[in-house]
Amino acid sequence: MVLTMVPGVFAGLESAEIDYDAVAYRTSVILCEDPGWPSGESSWESFDTAHKDEIERMGLTISSNSPNILSKEKVSHFFNNSENLFLTEDDYRSKVIFGELPYYYNISLKIEDDPANITGTVAPDSRYGYMRRLVKLKEPGYAMINSGDFNDTSDYINAIDPSIYSGFSVIFDYGEIRNKSIDEAYRFMPQSEPAAITIHNFSNSLNKSDVVSVTLTKVRLKKDGTELPLAYGEYDNETYRFYIDDVLHTLQGPVEIKDADVLKFEMYPPLMFSDEIGTSLSVVFNMTYEYLPDETIPHYYISGDIPYAYDRDYMTEPSLRNGVMEVMIW
């Protein structure tokens, strides 16, 4: 009788075996099949360090409908490549690994020829859970506008005022951009992805024997044609950046750009009013061209509206790059 009772006495003292593979699998599912929470317009990657307690889950997909297709913005923030959000070990444990135990982890993402992104500590030689997932990283689209292709508007001047006051706009029609007939993997997603406008070949597109100066007087943003009340004199903000030949500038102007080659305007997600399907946002570049006082010949400059849209020669549409996600838990 005593011999039969002894095993039961010590039953509660036996250590339970932890299934680390199951934890690694669950973690990989959250990373590769879930967009995280919050999601949508105020997605988790839009939170800064001061508000990261509001992040409940850090999935990396572009949406719950596109498993294994990762968002470049989410990946950047997850691996602490963002200026605004800094994550600690406790953040990773509580927002992506979960569980009552303080698991150690090593999470890496390798995209084609890019350097690997890694967070965590070095894994031991044995007794760890492992999961490997083949994924794709979505590269957002952008506009690369060759000035020579649009510098074709002409006008005549008078010798008293040999200037032309002009400009052009890049139009974001959200109804067209958020076209749901296009798969999310290849769709512009202004609520969660950045947008970039690069005007290149500017100086070379000018007739230097004709043009005395070109002044960028200001850059303005308009919603449905109405100028937005923004801080145009700021260099640094969470909405946009503006560069002239890789030098950061305000939108206020004026600045001489006759010898400038590249103007680049970047907007960060979520783009303003991108949740309003019937709305358009315009980035307006106002310029003044001063010419030699020759009234007999036409003088050329850029003007008009350039749509930020699909199926345009100057648009690079979203694309996918191959990658591997590896998760180790112990």
Image (spheres, rainbow, N blue to C red):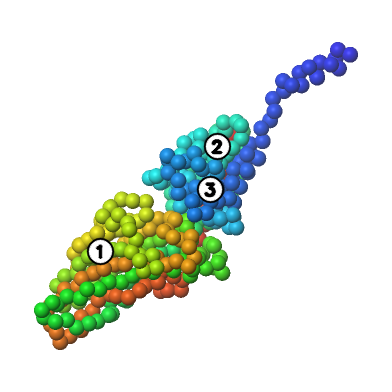
Q: Position of residue 33 (x, y in %)?
A: 59, 51
Is 324 left or right of 207, judged from the image as shown?
Answer: right
Q: Which of labels 2 and 1 is toward the front? A: 1
Q: Is residue 311 visible?
A: yes
Three-letter amino acid code at the position of disc 2: Ser
Residue, disc 2:
94
- Report the residue at 34% width, 61% height from top: 228
Three-letter amino acid code at the position of disc 3: Pro
For residue 258, which numbered disc appears in the image? none
Marked residue nearer the N-terminal end (3 or 1): 3
Marked residue nearer the N-terminal end (2 or 1): 2
Q: Position of residue 283 (x, y in %)?
A: 34, 65
Is 69 left or right of 48, judged from the image as shown?
Answer: right
Three-letter amino acid code at the position of disc 1: Lys
Q: Are marks 3 and 1 in contact (CB under 8 Å)?
A: no
- Report the residue at 50% width, 50% height from top: 43
Q: Tally the marks.
A: 3
In front here: 25 or 275?
275
- Asked which quadrant contains residue 127, the reply is top right
Residue, disc 1:
218
Relative to residue 172, is residue 24 depicted above or below?
above
